[in-house]
Image (tube, helix red, strand yellow):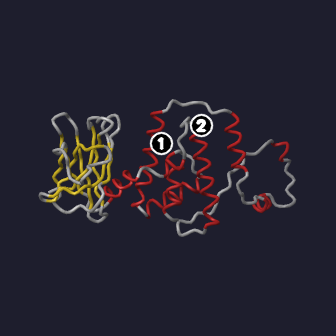
Amino acid sequence: MNERDFADLAVGHALNALSEADERAYQEALAGNPHWGHHVRGAADAVAAISASVEPVEPPPSVRASLFARISELPQESAVASTSESFPPGDDEDFAAAGAAPVEPERETVSVGPSSASGSRPRRWFTLAASLAAVLILGFGAVTVSQLVSPPSSVVALRQIEDAPDAQSASTTLPDGTVATAHWSPSTGQSVLVTDGMPALAADKTYELWFVRGDTPIAAGTFEPDEAGRATAVLKGEMHAGDVIAVTIEPAGGSPDGTPSTAPVVAVATA
């Protein structure tokens, strides 16, 4: 199983939409590839955030009918052979009189190794269709399955750092209660600043990130916190050991000359 297949299954798992076979494949793949855990956390976090922020609504019956009609059109393995083996010729039991028997769902053969495109596609489409059904039934509105599978790049970077064996972090708390935490990992070559409580800025201002190396500030991108002052921002460029990660307030779009125009409002020492 490749990582893309696993990401699909992680969404289905978060929505409780996997078949028994896919759930088993998901668990086996996760056990064999623990570094894929960020897909699990991403799907779970997205589902939790969406369900907490949107009031459930009942989808129109036509939506449900249309969705399951599409699912029924997906390729299915023939059950003729298994039926003939289960009930050998000559069995005179009156099954019609006995009433309808429960129908066992079809189960596919599971492999956690590399799969062909033709073998993985039916499972992926079933997983995504089932996930979409759950999204509609739970009233998640306009949120799509692709949004669940693909969290923001800054969140992905943070999880990769946290999963790295050399992950490091440092925090600072400002007098107004703002908390800024720098996360970095030399092996991933990434650094991320996470903030909580950053004050809102005027429309013509933005926060800009800097690596301060000795006495030299190096621009590392801009970011905009949400209404609560929270942000997860990837620093652009290479961090060196001992750099101070700083934030200044600059004109919208960033410093026009590539140097800070104000004193830092945040400075996180990494050494």
Report the quarter where the C terminus lies.
Answer: bottom left
Question: Quick check: 232 left or right of 101?
Answer: left
Drawn side of residue 129 relative to residue 52, left or right? right
| Relative side of 122 to 264, left or right | right
Of the residues shown, which amino acid type is indicated by label 1? Val
Q: Where in the figure is residue 13, as x and y percent of width and height?
A: 51, 49
- Residue 77's x, y, as percent? 72, 60
Along the line of sight, which residue is nearer the eye, 88 or 253? 253
Q: Depth check: 43 or 211 in front?
A: 211
- Residue 109: give x, y in percent of width and height: 62, 63
Q: Residue at x 49, y 61 (%)?
A: 28
Q: Residue at x 61, y 47 (%)?
A: 130
Viewer-closest of 67 and 223: 223
Residue linked to disc 1? 47
Classify residue 36 by image quadrant.
bottom left
Q: Secondary structure at mark 2?
A: helix
Q: Above or below — where is 43 with respect to 229?
A: below
Residue identifier under label 2:
137
Residue 61's place in the image compared with 244, above or below, is: above
Secondary structure category for the residue under label 1: helix
Give me the residue at 59% from left, 39% from top: 136
Q: How many marks?
A: 2
Label 1, label 2: how many angstroms apart (C-alpha)? 13 Å
